[in-house]
Image (cartoon, helix red, strand yellow):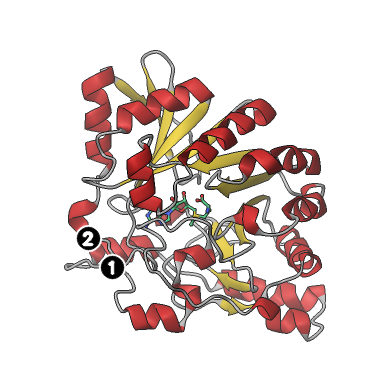
């Protein structure tokens, strides 16, 4: 099933909670947030029923995210419900790693396929400043556990000028040591990034130049037909890494991702200001066919190119600049709709 720009419905980001145990300055910089009402958060059976409908319509990749997904009680139970479903080719999890060591074996046993851990700095003082929690050791322990259980992983790093842009080489070397492919992410002006400014974005070009200065020739890895957000590259010694250039060189044309929030709102673009309510119909007893019709109609009418629209703006500022507005609608937040 394709949208108006010919993009297939394939990739679903499933946010299982809007809560997080870190307060990263580029995502959740405020002291206080409006949380999704607990009674609105989907039960696993409800999430599983929606997943069935998405799979029937062509989704074959699911990434569990949040908030911090490992804060959701008994997450392995959800993984077990989803992992074996017909048509699902890839089940991944994005986590900040703080609680990973304790849960990794249960997640693996439940059928999780892949892990991505977010890590922006190797310096303890910076980690504390960036996330407001002294948890770098826990993240390292989580990464070691992921290496033991899965052999490999991805490491997501948001690059911010003046914060961690001097750590690109160190993070790449760290990734090599733990068998983690680092993906450098351009700082995005998404909801929640209320402190975003263009001058703090380190572009794909700058990231490549900095790494070339240290490693010499960097070769792009050709992946024809790939809709993955990261462009991948290889150093001369074969080490690979990725760059996600959503801010300066967005890839809306191939974007096959949509997002389901923990309370069952479906967003067709990370920058969308309105979502499609799936919880309401589900709880009112809609049949699978009725839900299918709602999702199919939403996707067939999709023409979102949110990141490209942002580039086209002359004077670019934080996407949702008004704190009051963010406070009124938690769905606008990155931590609600997942990264
Ligand atoms: N808590 C989990 C984690 O830390 O990976 C999952 C949710 S988090 C919202 C998912 C990803 O979004 C993380 O890798 C995070 O770094 C990224 N992210 C959040 N805000 C961002 C921003 N303003 N620009 C770029 N990436 C961002």
User: Is 21 displayed left or right of 245 in the figure?
Assistant: right
Q: Which residue is mark 1?
A: 318
Image point 58% across, 37% down: which residue? 142
Rendered-image quadrant of the N terminus: bottom right
Q: Position of residue 217 (x, y in %)?
A: 28, 19
Q: Position of residue 336 (x, y in %)?
A: 52, 67
The image shows residue 152, relative to residue 231, as above or below, that is: above
Q: Nearer the viewer, residue 288 or 108?
A: 108
Q: Position of residue 241 (x, y in %)?
A: 42, 30
Image point 31% across, 67% down: which residue? 194
Q: Nearer the viewer, residue 86 or 113?
A: 113
User: Is 108 displayed left or right of 145 in the figure?
Assistant: right
Q: How many labels sit on residues?
A: 2
Image point 21% across, 45% down: which residue? 162
Determine the CA span between mark 1 and mark 2: 7 Å
Q: Residues within 10 Å of mark 2 (few under 14, many from 20)?
A: some
Q: Nearer the viewer, residue 122 or 223?
A: 122
Q: Secondary structure at mark 2?
A: loop
Q: Nearer the viewer, residue 130 or 174?
A: 130
Rendered image quadrant of residue 58: bottom right
Can the viewer see residue 10?
no
Q: Secondary structure at mark 1?
A: loop
Furthest toward the bottom, the residue is: 284
Q: Which residue is mark 2?
A: 197
Q: Is mark 1 within 8 Å of ligand 1?
A: no
């Amino acid at each position: 099933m394709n949208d108006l720009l010919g993009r297939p419905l394939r990739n679903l980001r499933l946010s299982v909670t809007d809560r997080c145990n870190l307060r990263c300055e580029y995502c959740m910089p405020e002291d206080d947030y409006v949380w999704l009402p607990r009674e609105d958060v989907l039960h696993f059976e409800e999430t599983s029923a929606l997943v069935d409908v998405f799979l029937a319509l062509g989704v074959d990749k699911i990434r569990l995210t949040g908030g911090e997904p490992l804060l959701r009680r008994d997450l392995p139970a959800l993984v077990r419900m989803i992992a074996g479903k017909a048509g699902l080719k890839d089940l991944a999890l994005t986590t900040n790693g703080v609680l990973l060591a304790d849960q990794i074996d249960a997640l693996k046993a439940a059928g999780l396929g892949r892990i991505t851990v977010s890590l922006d700095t190797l310096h303890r003082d910076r980690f504390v400043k960036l996330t407001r929690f002294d948890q770098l050791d826990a993240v390292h322990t989580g990464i070691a556990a992921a290496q033991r259980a899965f052999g490999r992983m991805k490491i997501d790093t948001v690059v911010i000028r003046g914060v961690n842009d001097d750590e690109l080489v160190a993070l790449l070397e760290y990734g090599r040591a733990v068998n983690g492919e680092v993906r450098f992410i351009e700082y995005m002006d998404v909801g929640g990034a209320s402190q975003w400014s263009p001058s703090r974005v380190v572009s794909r070009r700058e990231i490549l130049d900095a790494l070339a200065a240290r490693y010499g020739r960097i070769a792009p890895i050709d992946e024809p037909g790939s809709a993955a957000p990261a462009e991948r590259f290889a150093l001369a010694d074969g080490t690979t890494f990725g760059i996600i250039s959503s801010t300066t060189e967005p890839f809306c044309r191939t974007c096959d991702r949509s997002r389901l929030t923990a309370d069952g709102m479906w967003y067709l673009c990370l920058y969308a200001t309105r979502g499609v309510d799936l919880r309401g119909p589900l709880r009112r007893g809609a049949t699978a066919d009725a839900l299918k019709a709602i999702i199919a109609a939403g996707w067939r009418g999709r023409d979102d190119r949110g990141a490209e629209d942002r580039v086209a703006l002359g004077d670019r500022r934080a996407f949702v600049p008004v704190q009051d507005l963010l406070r009124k609608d938690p769905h606008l937040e990155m931590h609600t709709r997942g990264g």
